[in-house]
Image: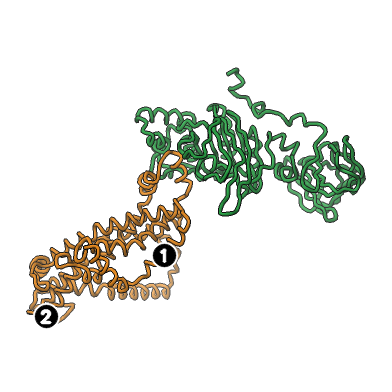
Chain colours: A green, B orange
Amino acid sequence: MATLQLNNIVKDFGGTQVIKGVDLEVKDREFVVFVGPSGCGKSTLMRMIAGLESTTSGEIAIDGQRVNEVGPADRGLAMVFQSYALYPHMTVEDNMGFSLRLAKVPKAERREKVLAAARILQLEPLLDRKPRALSGGQRQRVAIGRAIVRNPSIFLFDEPLSNLDAALRVQMRIELARLHEELDATMIYVTHDQIEAMTMADKIVVLQDGVVEQIGSPMELYHHPRNRFVAGFIGSPKMNFLEVEVRGADAEGVDVALPGGDCRVPVAGDGVSAGDTLTLGIRPEHLVLDEAGPLTGRIQVIERLGGVTSLYLEHGDSEWILVADGNVAHRVHDEVRFTFDPACAHLFTADGLALAHLTRHPLADIDRKENRASSASDGR
Amino acid sequence: MANMVRRHTTSARLWRAGLYTLLIMAALVYLLPLVVMLLTSLKPLDDIRAGGLLSLPSTISFEAWSKAWGSACTGMRCNGMSGYFLNSIAIVVPAVAISSLVGALNGYVLTKWRFRGANLCFALLLFGCFVPFQVVLMPMARTLGWLGLASSTSGLVLVHVVYGIAFTTLFFRNYYVSIPDEMIAAAKLDGAGFWRIFWRILLPVSGPIITVTVIWQFTQIWNDFLFGVSFAGFDSQPVTVALNNMVNTSTGVKEYNVDMAAAMIAALPTLVVYVLAGKYFVRGLTAGSVKG
């Protein structure tokens, strides 16, 4: 059992607030990812949970117990750092067993625990090596092993994969997910990589400027972003935004004017009236090339990835990104017409908040565990 | 160097020959004083009186060395350099050890336990590197008297520690800045406290900078004359002061061979340290500039 509650956490660095009142509830065995642009405070928030950084105000509670005044070693947490932070003068075994050694655990028991962790991570042949004789991926595994040995109630990961190359990152991502299931532990993970966030999280916390913008499952964030920031941050390439004028609105939908004709977006239009200006958001992958489409653009750049093609379009002073299939034959400077399904579009008010969709996306509440075959489904 | 591409024309060879000649000449000029000292120290007095600084000794004798070590007169006493050599060791060893350790601790606190005003503190410490010896003589004399350490070995150790801390702190601080803070954070999470992190994590990885600091401090303190002559008592004079007293004595015949042998003895420890550890000195100074 390990739950974590943050109640109105504030961090003040000499007059500047970097965390401005964060509330969060992490359930037992949940995989929570903090994501946001650099400088959003996600790492600071994690360091506060770890006890490496003091809390200006608010309460941190683990399993319902306030831990604000408890030192980092006594919170029952383990942390994995971006730079691995291994002790260069110690062997892998000593690195992993250092915390137990400080806790005066007898040598035999220490070795047993280190070996158990090494087995999980396939580190057994490397136990006698020094960190400098290991590759980046191996070092990262040792850092994870050092965390496992402590048998923590909560694992903290601070951008653990950013120093690895792309192929290794994919492999470690899967390994971490497997580990999460094997250890049945609560994990909190900081990253700026939205693919890591989308693939691993049960729950994503999107942060910006020290404020939580939205908390939700990956698919909820993708299909029902709470505001324009989350809509732009989740998804790649970025969502297209266009200022549109409202023709008419009611609880059943909002009619907006597009360059090629009107369009009815199925969102709750309460409080919106004709003549208002809203921002229409539509993801590049939801735009469809269509000879009879209401929108047009001239191709500026084509990025062919084989499977898909990204088209960068320009129309007047608005720019669009459109993701089409890999077999698009168009060339730069071609004029193309395109359309979209209004159900996929989002509307944002002037203060950035999204108008609620009338129907919930069928996959918005899908559980991460439904995405992989796991030992947990064997009735364990 | 072996795989360097070179032109093999006649003029290129001539250039190269000229270059090497110049380099060898320069090296000889720098080596000459040492050669003269060594030759003179091995000559009997008669050879020296016959003149010829560079002439080879007629017979090689180590008499001058043993006299310089055991029986030459330094001022009033005639026990040679040996006692003063030991005095110097008694000053240098604790002074180097203490100043290096304090420097390491200062560097550790200034980089890993940053406090309000840490930068100002470091700037003021740095200032200590630029204070000339002469400026501190009078206040230091008063302080030593007030502490009851005047004319003692402990007093000299204190002076060298105080003067050395500025340098050792500078060395260690700059080295520890390059050690990732995350390593310290990891140790904190593993349950290590202030001292444990210092002894078990930081010091074991400080090899290169410890070498630099020890060599630097050793040569500084061993070669010091001014503090030694100002603050040492009759029984605690370092070897540099003894050498001066021996060479500047105005009684009797001037024994150049003994003087040279004494100078060699006084210079030997620093020479040995450089020969043995010079490689690590350079390596330590450049450590961190290239990622291993």
Q: Which of marks 1 and 2 is in front?
A: 1
Q: Which chain does tag 2 point to?
A: B
Q: Which mark is residue A75?
A: none
Number of numbered labels in the structure image: 2
Q: Which residue lies furthest to the front in this view?
A: B146
- Neighbourhood count class around disc 2 (C-alpha, 10 Å): few under 14, some 14–19, many 20 upward: few
Q: Which chain does tag 1 point to?
A: B
Which residue is at a point 24% across and 70% down the rendered structure image? B225
Q: Which of marks 1 and 2 is nearer the N terminus?
A: 1
Kind of element beneath mark 1: helix
Of the 4 image quadrants, the one containing the C terminus of chain A is top right
Name the amino acid, label 1: Leu
Tell me if residue A70 comes above or below residue A380 in the rendering.
Answer: below
> Left or right: A145 with respect to A257?
left
Give the x, y percent position of residue A61. Answer: 55, 35
Give the x, y percent position of residue A234. Answer: 70, 42
Give the x, y percent position of residue A366. Answer: 70, 28
> Left or right: A264 with respect to B146?
right
Name the amino acid, label 2: Ser
- Between residue A255 and residue B110, name the one nearer to us: B110
- Kindly identify which residue carries mark 2: B250
Tell me if residue B139 comes above or below residue A309 in the rendering.
Answer: below
- Kindly identify which residue carries mark 1: B124
Question: CA separation, marks 1 and 2?
Answer: 45 Å
